[in-house]
Amino acid sequence: MDTKKLRQKILDLAIQGKLVPQDPDDEPASVLLERIQAEKQQMVKDGKLKAKDIKNDTIIFKGEDNLHYEKFQDGTVKCIEEEIPFEVPEGWEWCRLQSICSVLTDGTHKTPTYSDDGYIFLSSKNVVTGVIDWDNIMYIPEKLHNKLYERLAPQLNDILLAKNGTTGIAAIVDRDCIFDLYVSLALIRILEEIILPQYILIAIGSSYVQGYFNNSLKGIGVSNLHLEHIRKTLVSVPPYQEQLKIVQNANEIMSLCNKIEYEKNDISQLLLIIKSKILNLAIHGKLVPQDSNDEPASVLLERILAEKEELIKQGKIKRDKKESIIFKGDDNSYYEKFTDGTKICIDEEISFDIPNNWNFCRLSVITIKEIKRGKTPKYIDNSNVKVFAQKCNLKAGGINLEFARFLDETNLIKYNNEEFMQYGDVVINSTGTGTLGRVGYYDIYDSKVVPDSHVTIVRTSEKINKEYIYLFLKSMQSYLEKSGEGSTNQKELKPNTIKQLIIPIPPIEEQKSIINYVNNIFNKLSSLEKNLD
């Protein structure tokens, strides 16, 4: 169930009179609007409003020709049929938002001086999800507060509407406390007990009003919603009793949506935990049963080392002077032996035991192509060669070349054949806040793709199951995300960090069994996750 679409549908049905049935005995909305008009005129007489505050109030009515008209204070009348977005039930009326407000203004236009304590000062940043965020507030000193509060004193049940930042998002003041507003917020005070602020909040959230706001934005760079457009917003007004029913029904459905979302989030989190646990069991040798007849991983590693030695003789790769083998000594400790004959104990680097026919090794030992980042390319609008960037490595999993850029093919001289991406490469994002350490499996048969300098390519021997290597690195993603070096905003995951990873290697037949098991379970979990929508 798409709860976001459901929420929007409820708001749209509500303001069209399609959420609850109409009662012909309800006092019509026209009487409410007359009462509001009289109340505002009385407030002018009592000095609570100024004459200028109501000079732009209008009356919208349907003429004998069945068209909508708007009557202004000077007596002029204008046909506004083209502005009316939909028909409303009998007993409902249309009006401008300003006509049902006692206050519709914005906060201070002056950039405030903040203090560590004092009076609460809200901006559009505090109206983010239809509620007011009281936990992340700023404070202003008493002297400034006194000036602002004299002009505008927000109160309980006022509506705060974001004019920029979270533009169009509104919330009702749900706390009886003293606070001030910045210009990024508009304050809308409805004449309570005549119109429900909660109903107006529903109207503001509807597709129609949000669309009107979006089309009214002005400004270069940061777009703003101006008061003049907010004031002229058309609102469909139902009878008061129907407003009560609409608000009650909408709240009940929204509450149900909240429960569904919480349950979906709980299930989604549980699925993530299950997937992580499966990967963890896989690399510990606890996912599938061992077969004593399987060729041990040590033989597989010897075969890979022999393959690399032949490639070195052919001049296709360079010898890694730091290459090593990892073995278990007679004292049950793990040791690493290097090509120069030296050895060191590495028990501190190995946190778990593996089955007898498995082996540990550094990731660099089983790679043929050197683990390194791509080059800094020269881009062009279009060409036959794509450049794989961070964004191609999707957060939700998988690879998507639609996000690739294009290489200026005059740069091709810088690339040899081995630097083009190949099916089975594992891609790791080397930079980027929120993307650092993300692991992807390049399962695309596209021979004309090169990596950019923000991703690292891990290409292993064909003698080992590449999907198993991906599975291992995926299980290490959390570690890789935390292994960036450098400043807070410019952390980089260096190739050497990846090279030095110690990987548990199962026999080749068990690698295949692990992959089949994981793919089968993950497919079922993915199917379950899709059914949550």
Image (cartoon, helix red, strand yellow):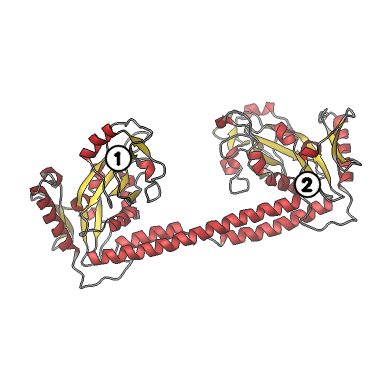
CA distance for labels 2 and 1:
57 Å
Across and down, in percent, residue 457 comes to 70, 37
Element assignment for label 1: strand
Residue 533 visible? The answer is: no
Kind of residue indicated by mark 2: Phe
Q: Compared to 523, does 479 lie above or below?
A: above
Residue under numbered circle 2 = 352
Total marks drawn? 2
* Mark 2 in CB contact with mark 1 (< 8 angstroms): no
Report the residue at 67% width, 35% height from top: 456
Across and down, in percent, residue 233 comes to 25, 50
- Tell me where residue 458 sits by quadrant: top right
Neighbours of disc 2 within 10 Å: few (<14), some (14-19), many (20+): few
Between residues 191 and 242, which one lies in front from this camera angle?
Answer: 191
Q: In this view, does 231 lie to the left or right of 18?
A: left
Across and down, in percent, residue 325 comes to 85, 37
Kind of residue indicated by mark 1: Leu
* First in residue order: circle 2 vs circle 1: 1
Mark identifier at residue 194? none
Element assignment for label 2: loop
Residue under numbered circle 1 = 181
